[in-house]
Amino acid sequence: MVKLKQAIVVEGKYDKNTLSQLVDTAIFTTDGFGGMNDKTFLSFLRSVAQARGLIVLTDSDGAGFVIRNRLKSALPKQGVLHAYIPDIYGKEKRKTAPGKEGKLGVEGMDGAVLLQALEQAGATFEDGSAPSPKEPLTKLDLYELGLSGHSDSKEKRLQLLKKLNFPEHMSANALLEALNILYGREEFLSYYEETL
C-alpha cells in the first residue's frame, strides 16, 4: 500500500473499496450523481482541495465524464488533479452483465493501472516514514467532546457539521477523517472551544 498526500474523490463505494486496498489516503464518494447537487458536499471538497489537494478519479464511460465535468466546474483548478483510467472493455466481478458502454470502471481496474493513473495525474506519493506535521484527532477526542458514544452525540455532530459547512450525513468516522485533513488536533480543539 502506498501513501498519498492528496485525497481522492470517486463515484461510488465499490470504487472506494478498490482504491482503499491500494492507497492510504482519504477517499470520498459522489454516490453517482447524488453529490453533484449537494452544495455542502461540494463546499467540503473545495476545502479538502485547498488544505491537502484532491484527485478526481471517475469511470471512463459517459456518466463518469458528466460527473467529472460537474466537479471541474464546481471545484477550483488549483489543488485539484484529474486521473483518468483507460477504456478497457469487460465486466466487474460483482456484476452479472457489463455496464451500458461495456467498459470497466474504477472498481474493475487492475491495481497497477490505477496507481499509474494516479502517478500520471501528478499525485504525490509519500513513503509514510515522515511524521505528520499535525497531531491527529482520535476517536477518544470525539468521545470526550461528546461527538460520539453519547445519547446526544448525533445532535452535537449535526450542529458541528452545519457550523463547519460539512455534509450533514457524515458519520463520526467520516467526520474524524475530514477533521484530520483540514485541522490539527490543537487547532480543532481550540476552534471547538471557541465556537460551540
Image (cartoon, rainbow, N blue to C red):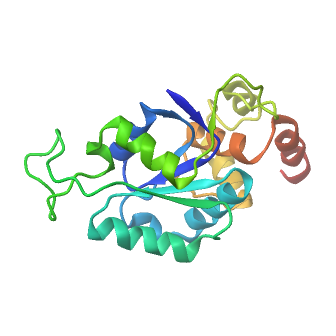
Q: Residue at x 30, y 38 (%)?
A: 110
Q: Relative to 140, is 193 on the left or the right?
A: right
Q: Position of residue 32 (x, y in %)?
A: 35, 61
Q: Relative to 174, is 32 on the left or the right?
A: left
Q: Relative to 130, is 97 on the left or the right?
A: left
Residue at the outermost top position: 129
Let me know if residue 37 appears in the view. Answer: no
Q: Quadrant of residue 161?
A: bottom right
Q: Residue at x 43, y 44 (%)?
A: 116
Residue at the outermost bottom position: 73
Q: Nearer the viewer, residue 56 or 137?
A: 56
Q: Position of residue 122 (x, y in %)?
A: 58, 52
Image height check: is 72 above or below 137?
below
Image height check: is 11 above or below 39?
above
Numbered disc total: 0
Let me know if residue 4 appears in the view. Answer: yes
Q: Position of residue 72 (x, y in %)?
A: 52, 72
Q: Residue at x 57, y 71 (%)?
A: 39
Q: Position of residue 3 (x, y in %)?
A: 58, 32
Q: Relative to 71, is 129 on the left or the right?
A: right
Q: Quadrant of residue 24?
A: top right
Q: Nearer the viewer, residue 108 or 145?
A: 108
Q: Quadrant of residue 144?
A: top right
Q: Residue at x 65, y 53 (%)?
A: 53
